[in-house]
Amino acid sequence: MLSDCLLNNFRITAQIGSGAYGLVFHVVDILTSREYAVKTVFKSSSMDEFYNKNGLNNNSQVARTTLLQTQLYHFFKSFQKKLFLPSVDLDSILQLTESELNRLPHYREIAFQLKVQSHGNIVKIHQVLESSIATFIVMDYYDRDLFTSIVDHKHFTNDGVLVKKVFLQLCSALDHCHRLGIYHCDIKPENVLLDRNDNAYLCDFGLSTKSKYLAPNVCVGSSYYMAPERILYCLNTTTNGMHVDECCSKLPTDTGDIWSLGIILINLTCIRNPWLKAHQNEDNTFHHFANDNNVLKKILPISDDLFSVLTSILQLNPYTRVDIKNLMSQVSSLTSFTREGPLSQVPILSNEVYMTHIIRNENLYLDGSSHFTVDQEQIQEQQQIQEQQEQEEQEEQEQEEEGVEQESDIPSTYNSDGSMEKYEYTNNHNNTTFLSSSIDSTPYQSDIDDFGASKDCKFQQDTLRNRLLCLQMNFSTLTDGSNEKWLPDY
Ligand SMILES: Nc1ncnc2c1ncn2[C@@H]1O[C@H](COP(=O)(O)OP(=O)(O)OP(=O)(O)O)[C@@H](O)[C@H]1O
């Protein structure tokens, strides 16, 4: 519908993605013939006006994409299909203060991505164009995402080095984000893009946050990949030989991302998800895993080596999860992913392979024993970041003490696209969790600073994800007989 529309020097060729408040287009620069992706984020005020004017209920997810397309079409049409828009200085976006970001919530995603995009495995933003109804984010374009590549193309089934490469690049990108104080919170294969040489690029910072800690049960992310403490925080959990303190009022955000990496590692090696959600009461498989993690070996064709890596990632206690550097070291040293088949033998990565194909622009390197060491420059950079974070935390604390109202940096900007189903959890004081389908337009309402309060939180479940097989079975039957019959073909 929008093909042949011109946005400055970019010709729109096709729509390649959609969200509740946004659409993603493939465009070609008519001056250089280079391809780009343009994410169009509609301003919530313009959306509300549009819905009200047309007497529409903005809760209908199915209708949303069409409405966004229609609104954009009319906008282009009123300018003879040629829009000439001013670009916003990228440095000025990086300088936006917390209160400015609260007034311009759709700029939060852009600001966070700009902050981390110097890493070679993060999608780069080139321009931000501003109009009255939407902001257009011009980014590098990649024609495959990791989900399609794993599930549809079966691209990783025969190539253990490729699994390591993509996984380690993703780890490296995430480590970079965490070192800069940005926590992605929506790590999943759909948010990892691949270039023609199978290099991975992390995208979609729409749910990312600067909060180093989140209250238990603050649900943020996509259900299959979400860490258990974001879904149902168990008091006095003692499973898997660990103990989560009952009094814990805040939990680290970074280790939630690490949990998601563990699920991606399972996707890459087994082409399946272990459970629909890490909820002990509502997910049978996860419930059994929480009582005995050896279940993973029964439900997945994984080698003992991979099992031990997964055990270090999928710790119920967020504080005992492996850190990213150790995880990278463990994965690069793995000699097998599965018990049988092409992934049952995988080479250990040499320093050279690691440096050339995996880390590229980073300062990390492997020493002879395959452990990561960090150079002096990196240590200094980390110290500076840590000092800056400590200063920010101190300022926040001072503000709190002075009674200044805290501003949450949980995104509250725009919805997920029609392909996602959203579910709302309300966790009350009795620790009873209700599940109800929600088509509310605001993804997250939690006040993250009010740790004591009951939490209203919502998270998304991508219906398309059902293409990735999930092991949902009658567990007594599983433990009864041969496991193989429960393993879907792949
Ligand atoms: N730079 C890009 N190159 C190619 N495709 C892209 C790019 N950015 C996004 N896409 C495509 O558009 C889809 C939606 O993009 P993105 O996830 O950033 O938007 P969103 O509105 O936040 O969606 P969601 O609600 O599903 O998270 C992606 O899954 C991907 O298929």
Image (cartoon, rainbow, N blue to C red):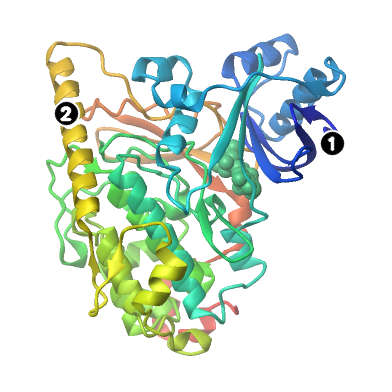
- Residue type (three-letter) at the residue carrying disc 1: Ser
- Residue type (three-letter) at the residue carrying disc 2: Gln
Residue visible at 38% across and 79% down in the picture: 349
Q: Residue 38 placed where, x, y %?
A: 66, 36
The reply to whether residue 370 is in sight is yes
Q: Within the image, what quadrant is residue 287 found in?
A: bottom left
Q: Earlier in the sequence, mark 2 or mark 1?
A: 1
Residue at which label 1 appears: 3
- Please tell me whether mark 2 sits on a helix, a strand or a loop: helix
Residue at which label 2 appears: 391
- Please tell me whether mark 1 sits on a helix, a strand or a loop: loop
Work out whether 373 lies above or below 173.
below
Q: Nearer the viewer, residue 47 or 236?
A: 47
Residue visible at 76% across and 45% down in the picture: 33
Q: Residue 386 placed where, x, y %?
A: 19, 40
In three-dimensional space, the C-alpha distance between marks 2 and 1, rounded to whole angstroms, equals 49 Å
Question: Looking at the rendered structure, which numbered label has been put on residue 108?
Answer: none
Quadrant of the snapshot with the C terminus: bottom right
Q: Within the image, what quadrant is residue 237 found in?
A: bottom left
Q: Within the image, what quadrant is residue 393 found in?
A: top left
The answer to whether the residue bearing label 1 lies less than 8 angstroms from the nearest atom of ligand 1 is no
Q: Residue 342 placed where, x, y %?
A: 52, 87
